[in-house]
Structures are given as structure tokens and as C-alpha cells.
Image (tube, grey):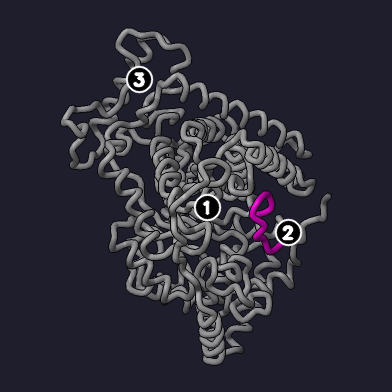
């Protein structure tokens, strides 16, 4: 790009920056030195390829979505939390919000993630252990008791039974008197990554995609601010993928959902802004920053050039980040505070829109109140003390960062081409479904995980406290344990709620939902009606399993 084009780009950025709202804050260094809101090539410089870097708030968004960076608005502190029953988790949410958290992120227990009630035989011993137990809308009422859902953004990390759980959230908001059209938040709903990495599915892919399409239609029409899909790379990375695999598989899944929306006749400029992303931030600092920058650039280009989006907001890749759970170690767990801080800083310098920081004890158990507070304060120290919010994309133009961004992007593009080749019709969706069926994704992730593990065992890769610097004076941590009484009480509560219902009304609502499932009509209204009469998650998922069958992963050796 020549000097004249660069100067014109800077002028465009300046006009947008001047027109944008800025925070009332001190944008100087610790020593009081003023800093510019953005930095770029010096006047008169020719920079080949600068169009791939550009300016913040301008296509291809390598440097961020907004001309102000974090001067306009800092990232949302969204701590992932859930354990025990709804009342216990409600208390933790109030602690997070009271300590400065900007939004809620719900962690569900394993029975809920698998669409089972707490009294299901397969839920035995799992109720409340890795998240909160939600059996019906009444639990959702209690989960958000005293928390105004109309004014708090809420993220829910669940995919297989995401749609009925979302309906319970809507009913809870309805009972609070909220205007549902104004609700804001994110539902994960990403079933592709379940088949690829996390394995929390219910049905064959096609029925899941039908429900997701219904949800996309419903939210686009009724709840435009709510993001019905958070395409998740986090679980792909935690399963052992490389950074480039995480990026490529995640964006490919996103392209699949774009194709789903288009197949429903939805306007891409209307539904694409409702797609968001969820990435892992691992401990290789610069690789993660480059990954985030490449993600924005790839998404913007594909949405514009491949899928025909024209609205700026449809080109934006907005993403939440969680620091890498798999990087936490049971050995010398206090070291995890350092790892989490480095990973959080990478996410911030990569331009994340919201962030969860893991607690130091999460490799051993659910976080205690103290460790959860340390995780929260880690973000607040970064936000308030380090100056990283003063300049948009401060590493933009770094030879290393730009080269790494280009390299990760090139790897991702090779993967997209391979996925298309897997399919029968040249679409990304067809390739994803074939890759799932053939085990292509899981095999590639397993190979990457094995390669890394072998490097660890040879000492080529190092983890402090694990295979290097192993001596320590650290003492054993006290960890949070979930009492078996939680399960006993939750099952008893569920029994009382079932006994108090009008069973005929519940059965009729469930039958009506199945009847709609046999048509081409949108299932969300019928599912909401079932939830309103306290049909449980297990009952809703159960009748749909009876109708659609369940998915079993083929055995592979």
C-alpha cells in the first residue's frame, strides 16, 4: 500500500474515532506520558501489504472492530460459574456482580449438559458437581432470583439441550416482567464442536441443526440483540488441537451455521450479527494474539466475498475468551495465577470482547470464593493498572506478530480447502458432516495432542512444576467439595415440583411439541409452552429422543 492510501486510511480512522464515544479515563502512561489512541506507519511511508493490517474499526478488522479500541469500552468481565443447586449458584453470581463483574456466564452440571433430569439413573453422583443443576423453569427462576435479566447480559455454555434450556431462561425473564425483545446475551448451541471435540450431543446432526435453525429464526425475529449461537473453539483446543486447528475448525463451524441460516431463507445481514465466537487463550503469548487477529480478518473476508454480506456488523467477528483450562497444573497450582494472567493479557491484546479467567484450583475442583476472587482481580488489574486499554491493537505492525498472523491464516485456509474437499457438494457444511462421520476431525486433534505430549515427555516442551523446576515449598490447597446432600435435595425438590403440576397439561404440551416437530413449523413457541407448565429438561429431551432417535459415535481404532 502506498503512502497516499495509508494517509487516506488514517484520515478515515480519525473521523470515525472523533465521532465515537470514549470513556472518561486517563489515557497516559504510569509516568504521565500521553499516548496516541492508535499507531501506524509514519507519514509518507509505503508499506507493502498494509491493507491486510489496516486501521482499527475498518475492514478487514485485523486490528479490532472499533476505531476506539478499549478507549471506547473495555472488554466485559464475564466469569464462568455454576455449582451445586440454583440457590448456591445465585449467591456466587451476586458475589461476582457485586465485585465488579460485568456479565454472567452459566456453567451447567453434566446431567443438564446431557439433557437429563437430576432424578435420572444416569445422573447419579453427578448432580451439581461441574456446574449448576437445572431441571425446569423453576430452577431458572431461582438461579436468577434478585438479578434483573433485562439489564444483565447472560451467557449459557450448553449445546446439546441448549434450545430447551434457553426456553427456560426466556420463561424466567418473562416471569420477572422483562421485555423479552430487549434481552441480551449469548447461547452456545454449537453442536458441530460437540461431534468434533466435546461429545455432549443428544440426536443425529440433522435434528440438532433443525433446532438451531429454528432458534436462529426466532431470535432474529423476536430477540434481535440476543446471540443464539456462540461458535466454540475453546473445547476444540482443550481436546488437544493446535492454535491453527482451533481457529480453522471453529471458523469452519461458523461458516456451516451461516450456510444453515441462508438455507432457511434468512437475510445474512440480519442473522450474521447474531453469531459470536468463543476461543481459548493458551499460554503461548504471541501465537494466541496472532490467532485472534487472523480470526477477525478471515471471518470478514469470507462473510463478504463468499457469503455476500454487505452490512458492516455482519462482517464483525465478536468473541469471548476463556483462559486455557488445560494449561492449569495440579502440581504447584499457585503457578496457575501467572499462567492465567499471561493468557488473559494475550486475549486482551488480541482484542477480545469479553473474558473469563480461570481460578488457580480449577484443575482440582470447582473454584473456592477466594480463588474465584483472585481470577476476577486478575482481569481488573489488567484493566485498571497496566495501560493496555489506552491504545488500540498496540502490537499492530510488529514484524513478528504480523508474520505469525499471516502464517496462522494461511494454515486455516488450507484446512478450509480440505474440509470442502471432504464434502459432496463443495459446501463447508457437507465437509463438516463428512469429517464428523469419518472421524477426520477427532483423528487430527488426537494426532496433535499426541505430538505435544511426546514433546513434553522428551523435555522439548516445558511446564514449570511438572517437568522442570519441580521442587516446591507449596502446601496442599483446600478445595471446594460439593456435598452429596445437594443431589438428595435437588431430587426431592424435583419430585415435589412434579407432584404439584397438572400432569395432563404437561403431557398435552409435550405432545403438541412433538406434533410441531413433525412439521416444518418453528418449534420454539411450542417448546416455550411446555416449559411454562414446568415440563422438565429430561422430559422435553426424552420425547424428542423418542421421535428423532439418539446419536452414537461409531467405534474407531
The residue drawn where x is 46% and y is 68% is 480
Q: Which mark is residue 204?
A: 2
For label 1, the SS is loop
**What residue does disc 3 label?**
9
Q: Please identify the quarter of the rendering in which residue 516 is found.
A: bottom right
Q: Please identify the quarter of the rendering in which residue 537 is found.
A: bottom right
Give the alpha-carbon distance from disc 2 to disc 1, as whole Å. 40 Å
Q: How many discs mark residues in the rendered view?
A: 3
Point out residue 321 in the picture as x, y percentages from the top left corner.
46, 46
Give the alpha-carbon distance from disc 3 to disc 1, as whole Å. 50 Å
**What residue does disc 1 label?**
331
First in sequence, mark 2 or 1: give its number: 2
First in sequence, mark 3 or 1: give its number: 3
Considering depth in this image, is 281 or 434 the residue closer to the camera? Answer: 281
Stretch in magenta:
194-204
Considering depth in this image, is 507 or 383 the residue closer to the camera? Answer: 383
For label 2, the SS is loop
Point out residue 213 in the picture as x, y percentages from the top left corner.
60, 55
The residue drawn where x is 47% and y is 53% is 333
**Do the residues under discs 3 and 1 have CB atoms within 8 angstroms?**
no
Query: In the figure, 326 relative to 406: above or below?
Result: below
User: Which quadrant holds the N terminus?
Assistant: top left
- The answer, for residue 243, to whether it is visible in the render is yes
Q: Nearer the viewer, mark 2 or mark 1?
A: 1
Query: In the figure, 503 relative to 195: above or below?
Result: below
First in sequence, mark 3 or 2: give its number: 3
Asked if the stretch drawn in magenta spans residue 195, the answer is yes
Amino acid at each position: 500500500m502506498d503512502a497516499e492510501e495509508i494517509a487516506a486510511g488514517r484520515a478515515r480512522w480519525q473521523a470515525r474515532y472523533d465521532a465515537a464515544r470514549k470513556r472518561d479515563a486517563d489515557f497516559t502512561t504510569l509516568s504521565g506520558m500521553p499516548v496516541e489512541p492508535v499507531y501506524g506507519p509514519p507519514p509518507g511511508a509505503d508499506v507493502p501489504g498494509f491493507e491486510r493490517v489496516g486501521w482499527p474499526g475498518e475492514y478487514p478488522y485485523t486490528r479490532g472492530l472499533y476505531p476506539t479500541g478499549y478507549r471506547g469500552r473495555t472488554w466485559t468481565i464475564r466469569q464462568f460459574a455454576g455449582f451445586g443447586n440454583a440457590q448456591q449458584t445465585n449467591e456466587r453470581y451476586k458475589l461476582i456482580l457485586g465485585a465488579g463483574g460485568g456479565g454472567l456466564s452459566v456453567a451447567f452440571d453434566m446431567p443438564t449438559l446431557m439433557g437429563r433430569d437430576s432424578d435420572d439413573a444416569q445422573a447419579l453422583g453427578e448432580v451439581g458437581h461441574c456446574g449448576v443443576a437445572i431441571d425446569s423453569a423453576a430452577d431458572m427462576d431461582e438461579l436468577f432470583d434478585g438479578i434483573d435479566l433485562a439489564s444483565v447480559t447472560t451467557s449459557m455454555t450448553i449445546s446439546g439441550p441448549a434450545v430447551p434450556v434457553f426456553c427456560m431462561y426466556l420463561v424466567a425473564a418473562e416471569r420477572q416482567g422483562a421485555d423479552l425483545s430487549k434481552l441480551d446475551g449469548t447461547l452456545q448451541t454449537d453442536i458441530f464442536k460437540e461431534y468434533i471435540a466435546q461429545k455432549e450431543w443428544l440426536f443425529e446432526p440433522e435434528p440438532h441443526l433443525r433446532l438451531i435453525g429454528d432458534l436462529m429464526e426466532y431470535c432474529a425475529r423476536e430477540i434481535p440483540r440476543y446471540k443464539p449461537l456462540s461458535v466454540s473453539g475453546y473445547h476444540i483446543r482443550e481436546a488437544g488441537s493446535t492454535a491453527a486447528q482451533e481457529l480453522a475448525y471453529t471458523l469452519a463451524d461458523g461458516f456451516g451455521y451461516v450456510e444453515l441460516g441462508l438455507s432457511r431463507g434468512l437475510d445474512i445481514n440480519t442473522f450474521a450479527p447474531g453469531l459470536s465466537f468463543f476461543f481459548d487463550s493458551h499460554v503461548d503469548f504471541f501465537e494466541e494474539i496472532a490467532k485472534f487477529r487472523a480470526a477477525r480478518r478471515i471471518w470478514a473476508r469470507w462473510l463478504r466475498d463468499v457469503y455476500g454480506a454487505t452490512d458492516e456488523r455482519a462482517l464483525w467477528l465478536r468473541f469471548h475468551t476463556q483462559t486455557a483450562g488445560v494449561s492449569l497444573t495440579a502440581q504447584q497450582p499457585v503457578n496457575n495465577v501467572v499462567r492465567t494472567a499471561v493468557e488473559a493479557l494475550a486475549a486482551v491484546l488480541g482484542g477480545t470482547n469479553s473474558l473469563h479467567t480461570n481460578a488457580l484450583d480449577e484443575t482440582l475442583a470447582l473454584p473456592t470464593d477466594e480463588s474465584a476472587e483472585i481470577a476476577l482481580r486478575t482481569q481488573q488489574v489488567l484493566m485498571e493498572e497496566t495501560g493496555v486499554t489506552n491504545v488500540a491493537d498496540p502490537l499492530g505492525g510488529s514484524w513478528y506478530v504480523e508474520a505469525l498472523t499471516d502464517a496462522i491464516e494461511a494454515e486455516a485456509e488450507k484446512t478450509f480447502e480440505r474440509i470442502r474437499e471432504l464434502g459432496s457438494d463443495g459446501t463447508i457444511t457437507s465437509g463438516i458432516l463428512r469429517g464428523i462421520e469419518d472421524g477426520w476431525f477427532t483423528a487430527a486433534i488426537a494426532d496433535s495432542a499426541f505430538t505435544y505430549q511426546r514433546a513434553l515427555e522428551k523435555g522439548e516442551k516445558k511446564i514449570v512444576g511438572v517437568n522442570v523446576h519441580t521442587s516446591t515449598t507449596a502446601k496442599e490447597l483446600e478445595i471446594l467439595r460439593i456435598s452429596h446432600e445437594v443431589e438428595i435435595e435437588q431430587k426431592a425438590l424435583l419430585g415435589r415440583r412434579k407432584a404439584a403440576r397438572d400432569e395432563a397439561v404437561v403431557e398435552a404440551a409435550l405432545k403438541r411439541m412433538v406434533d410441531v416437530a413433525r412439521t416444518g413449523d418453528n418449534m420454539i413457541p411450542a417448546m416455550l409452552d411446555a416449559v411454562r407448565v414446568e415440563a422438565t429438561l429430561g422430559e422435553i429431551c426424552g420425547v424428542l429422543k423418542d421421535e428423532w432417535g439418539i446419536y452414537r459415535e461409531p467405534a474407531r481404532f
